[in-house]
Image (cartoon, grey):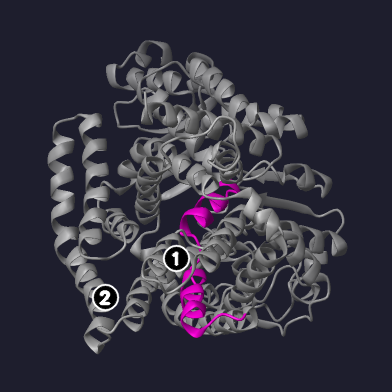
């Protein structure tokens, strides 16, 4: 069966490797790579025969990974980090090349081979970083946007650097040869944003009109791979072109649908790519030169990581972001395979340097996802010995803070909650670690403290001992844990509410006596399901039963750790089904001129009058002696079916006989 047999072997091996990685609580890509080593040509046993054909398919996997990344990584998310993504990456590349030259000199290599090695290792693997962040549920955090933004710029800049080295190794060296790749990139980006942004959405609009999901998926895939191949024809990166196509498409009305439809296809081809990476590794060569390869890996990746950490700090990113860049950008980019192959083909490096460099790249991809897991524990350890920062406050009451709400973690959640609390007259203070968000909240006149909410001096300034409630709004799990621990040291019994993006932190949150854990993604799904069922006129009890079943499936990990959540969740679900309606009482209404007790609305219809609107004012919780008048708006609360029964009775006059 030829390549069909190879594909079956790759998929089955990747599946088993994924099972093993999941069982060991490691990213799936680690299992895929190890599976590739086992079925590779160097280990014997069941072996893929057509490695080159699988490698070609793996290139499609890289392109689809970056195409989907472009769909998720919109231009709006890039703009806030453009300084570090462009300027910071430029500084990092220069310093990493210097580190590479130093490594080459230590190894006794000549200048040209050292330069090729430097260019091969300057870029971090966007595909590996993306999959690792996704598996750890950290996509969308500021640290993830910084890492992905910098790795994408690295990939873009590797291409002209590689062409420059080709020219240096030939007699045709010229300024035009250096500038041409840069010019090509600039022209391509300009065309994509000017032409592609206008016409790609029109094509998708026409396809959507045919109402064929299959054709839509094929069109989206063809756009990503077709534009990638177009850039390849012009001597640019295939994966870079696919990423730019996704980036342009993300700004259209069809970006989210394209991403959701593409994910299954992307994941299958992504498996091929990571298994292929493992197939390239020769375990016997690695064992014979283990010390050298490990030394190259440590020097290149940790040196580059140190530069990335310093650069992100230089550009004003603090807290966990420098550590995330240091540990999370360990994997060397898959573009390194292209660079090293070009160096070998042009005679710039020999077979020994090529093999050492290739194994160094693969080892970085294997160890990178594991090393990235050190970010949280190292950050927690560093927090214990960190010098407290200066406290900067804005709009804090002169009389101090007492019985108030602390919104720790900042961001849009804190700003919106703070605005609501201020409107209700509730005292609150936002602890905002990000200076940009601090300025936005300052403009809105909210009480603010600029600083790390995990630091004791900041929490003391926020009056944590006297706080009525602490709301942790950080979207990063390790940071939230650190904040809660710091709060508990000063307020052992206060109420804490926290956002949580995954199940892995729930046991620890339970140990820290967190009163409420909110899962924003799940709550949105449940609310959507509730609205769908209600708009389809399903009876309220049926809706509640279905939501309870769905909630149990979604929250099963949470219920196992916190059994009491199931009861409260059911009560909340029941409450959410109670809707409120307003009924206008005209002069002919049989209710006008009667008290609420005389109207017997509760007894007849099973709904409760919770408010009355009169002369532009809302009177809440009126008692039985409250006299209804013509022109009043009666606010009733009940399930949708009973509410409708009451409203219809007012329209058809069926209350007249009963009300007399």
Label ID, residue 181: 2
Nearest to the observer: residue 541 or residue 582: 541
Q: From this viewpoint, is residue 140 visible?
A: yes
Q: Is residue 156 above or below residue 277?
A: below
Tell me if residue 427 can be seen. no
Q: Taking 252 as reference, is 110 above or below it?
A: below
Q: Position of residue 278 (x, y in %)?
A: 55, 46
Give neighbour class at mark 1: few <14, some 14-19, many 20+ (Cα, 10 Å): many
Residue plotted at (49% across, 14% down):
604
Residue 117 in the image, given as x and y percentages of width and height: 51, 73
Residue found 56% across the figure and 61% down from its top: 331
Please give the name of the residue rendered at 77% of the width and 42% of the height, measured from the top-left corner: 507
Q: Which residue is mark 1?
A: 340
Query: What residue span does the magenta drawing correspond to?
Result: 108-137
Image location of residue 137, percent across then percent down: 58, 48
Asked if the magenta segment contains residue 133, the reply would be yes
């Amino acid at each position: 069966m030829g390549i069909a047999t190879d594909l079956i072997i790759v998929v089955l091996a990747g599946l088993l490797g994924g099972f093993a990685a999941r069982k060991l609580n490691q990213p799936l890509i680690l299992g895929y790579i190890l599976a590739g080593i086992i079925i590779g040509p160097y280990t014997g046993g069941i072996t893929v025969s057509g490695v080159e054909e699988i490698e070609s398919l793996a290139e499609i996997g890289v392109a689809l990974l970056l195409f989907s990344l472009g769909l998720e990584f919109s231009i709006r998310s890039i703009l806030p980090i453009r300084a570090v993504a462009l300027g910071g990456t430029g500084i990092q590349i220069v310093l990493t090349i210097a580190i590479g030259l130093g490594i080459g000199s230590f190894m006794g290599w000549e200048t040209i081979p050292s330069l090729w090695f430097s260019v091969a290792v300057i870029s971090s693997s966007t595909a590996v970083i993306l999959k690792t962040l996704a598996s750890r549920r950290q996509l969308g955090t500021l640290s993830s946007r910084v890492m992905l933004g910098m790795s994408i710029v690295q990939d873009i800049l590797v291409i002209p650097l590689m062409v420059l080295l080709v020219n240096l190794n030939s007699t045709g060296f010229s300024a035009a040869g250096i500038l041409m790749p840069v010019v090509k990139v600039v022209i391509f980006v300009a065309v994509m944003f000017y032409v592609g942004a206008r016409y790609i959405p029109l094509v998708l609009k026409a396809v959507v009109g045919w109402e064929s999901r299959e054709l839509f998926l094929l069109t989206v895939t063809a756009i990503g791979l077709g534009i990638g191949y177009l850039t390849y024809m012009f001597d640019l990166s295939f994966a870079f072109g696919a990423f730019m196509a996704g980036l342009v498409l993300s700004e259209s009305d069809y970006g989210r649908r394209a991403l959701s439809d593409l994910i299954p296809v992307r994941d299958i081809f992504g498996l091929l790519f990571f298994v292929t990476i493992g197939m390239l590794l020769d375990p016997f060569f690695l064992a014979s030169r283990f010390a050298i390869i490990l030394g190259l890996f440590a020097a290149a990746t940790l040196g580059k990581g140190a530069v990335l950490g310093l650069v992100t700090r230089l550009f004003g990113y603090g807290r966990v972001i420098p550590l995330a860049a240091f540990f999370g950008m360990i994997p060397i980019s898959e573009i390194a395979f292209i660079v090293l192959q070009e160096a070998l083909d042009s005679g710039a490096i020999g077979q020994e340097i090529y093999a050492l460099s290739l194994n160094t790249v693969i080892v970085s991809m294997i160890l990178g996802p594991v090393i990235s897991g050190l970010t949280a524990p190292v950050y927690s350890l560093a927090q214990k010995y960190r010098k407290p920062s200066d406290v900067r406050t804005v709009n804090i009451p002169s009389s101090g803070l007492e019985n108030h709400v602390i919104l720790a973690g900042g961001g849009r959640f804190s700003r919106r909650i703070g605005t609501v609390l201020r409107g209700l007259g509730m005292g609150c203070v936002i602890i905002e670690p990000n200076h940009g968000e601090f300025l936005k909240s300052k403009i809105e006149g909210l009480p603010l403290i600029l600083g790390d909410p995990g630091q004791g001096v900041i929490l003391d300034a926020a009056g944590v001992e006297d706080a009525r409630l602490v709301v942790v709004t950080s979207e990063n799990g390790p940071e939230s844990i650190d904040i809660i621990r710091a709060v508990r040291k000063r307020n052992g019994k206060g109420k804490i509410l926290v956002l949580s993006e995954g199940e892995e932190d729930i046991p620890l949150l339970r140990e820290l006596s967190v009163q409420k854990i909110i899962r924003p993604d799940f709550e949105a799904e449940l609310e959507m399901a509730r609205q769908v069922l209600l708009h389809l006129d399903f009876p309220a009890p049926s809706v509640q039963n279905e939501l309870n079943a769905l909630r149990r499936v979604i929250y099963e990990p949470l219920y196992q750790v916190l059994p009491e959540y199931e009861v409260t969740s059911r009560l909340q679900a029941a409450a959410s089904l109670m809707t409120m309606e307003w009924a206008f009482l005209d002069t002919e209404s049989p209710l006008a001129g009667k008290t609420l007790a005389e109207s017997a609305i509760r007894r007849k219809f099973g709904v409760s009058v919770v408010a009355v609107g009169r002369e532009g004012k809302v009177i809440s919780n009126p008692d039985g002696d409250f006299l209804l008048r013509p022109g009043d708006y009666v606010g009733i609360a009940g399930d949708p079916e009973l509410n409708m029964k009451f409203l219809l009775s007012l329209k058809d006059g069926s209350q007249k006989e009963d009300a007399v």
